[in-house]
Image: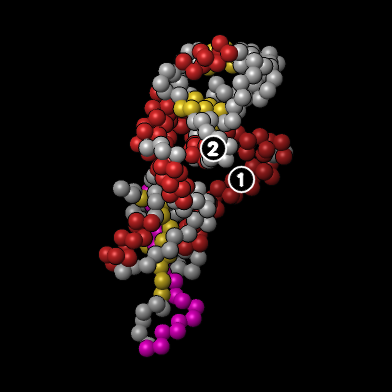
Amino acid sequence: MLSLDEWVVSIEGHHNSDSANGDNTNQYHYHMAVKLAKRARWFQIRKYLDDNFGIQVNFSDCHNTYYSAYRYVTKEDNEPLHSSGHPDLIVQNREGKSSLAEFIANRGNKAVDEALQLAKEFAEAESRYKRSKKSRIELLQDEMAGECTDGCEGRWVTAAEELLPCHHIPKDIFCKALFTALSKGRGKYQNVFIHGPANCWKSFILSPLKVIYDMFSNPATGSFAWIGAEQAEIIFLNDFRWDTKIIAWADLLQALEGDTVRLPAPKNVSSRDVELTKDFLPHQTHLWL
Ligand SMILES: [Zn+2]
């Protein structure tokens, strides 16, 4: 289900119409900018429009904001068609810019920088807060509704589905193990440990996780190896070699069992130690390669 917050449609004449038989086909085309309630996949929508209405659509992703897409779509049409209750973006933007210009003119650079930083933090705080309320499974589902990362085009899934049977790992068992690790977090029978010879694509099979989650990857060597692990959405130990300088063996076992583990943090950075608390949702999970 695709829901649109706002949309605008405009008509644009072709610069060179080479319609030899003099009819009107292809002398015009339409542009549409849509503001979606949430991310969506376009392939099926493109196919649906073509199959059912014979309308060929191209999707562009070179605009970062609805305003930028809106400006592009309406550049040649003075009377574009708007969704009901569509805000007047041109006027809004002009007013926004003039008050910003006024602010910059009246204050020094430092105040402007501070204001920009604050605005950025406000914007990020809201999305961070929303994210922190979600479970790992919900974050995964959000990602499922979005597009593939650039250059992938579904190839990761195809390759992964070929890779698993090569190593005699049934797909449903692998998926279930990962789902359990992501939903329940660390604990007995919940950790995922992947073992195999060099270059057998162990890292590859879990590589999408670093795109989906805020990941703490391998601890540094040295006494403060685990800084940041307590805030991460998942902990991923890739090519991990146990060393007592990184974590005591007893602590490692406790961590894998899902118990609270306290690991040292430098006192000038943090007043407390890094504390891996009991892994209830939506905290961490641990994956071992
Ligand atoms: Zn992909």
Query: Residue farthest to the left?
Result: 52
- The answer to whether residue 148 is visible is no
* Above or below: residue 1 compared with residue 218: below
Q: Does the beta carbon of the residue at mark 2 sit less than 8 Å from ligand 1?
A: no
Q: Secondary structure at mark 2?
A: helix
Rendered residue at 33%/49% (across/down): 2
* Above or below: residue 153 compared with residue 224: below
- Label disc, if present, on residue 238 of the rendered structure: none
Q: Position of residue 71 (x, y in %)?
A: 50, 59
Q: Which residues are magenta?
A: 5-21
Mark 2 neighbour class, 10 Å CA radius: few under 14, some 14 to 19, many 20 or more: few
The label nearer to you, 1 versus 2, is 2
Query: Residue farthest to the bottom?
Result: 21
- Label disc, if present, on residue 203 of the rendered structure: 2
- Label disc, if present, on residue 100 of the rendered structure: 1
Q: Callout 2, which amino acid?
A: Ser
Q: Callout 1, which amino acid?
A: Leu
The picture quadrant where one finds residue 262 is top right
Mark 1 neighbour class, 10 Å CA radius: few under 14, some 14 to 19, many 20 or more: few
* Above or below: residue 89 compared with residue 107: below
Rendered residue at 57%/33% (across/down): 121
Say whether residue 50 is left or right of residue 268.
left
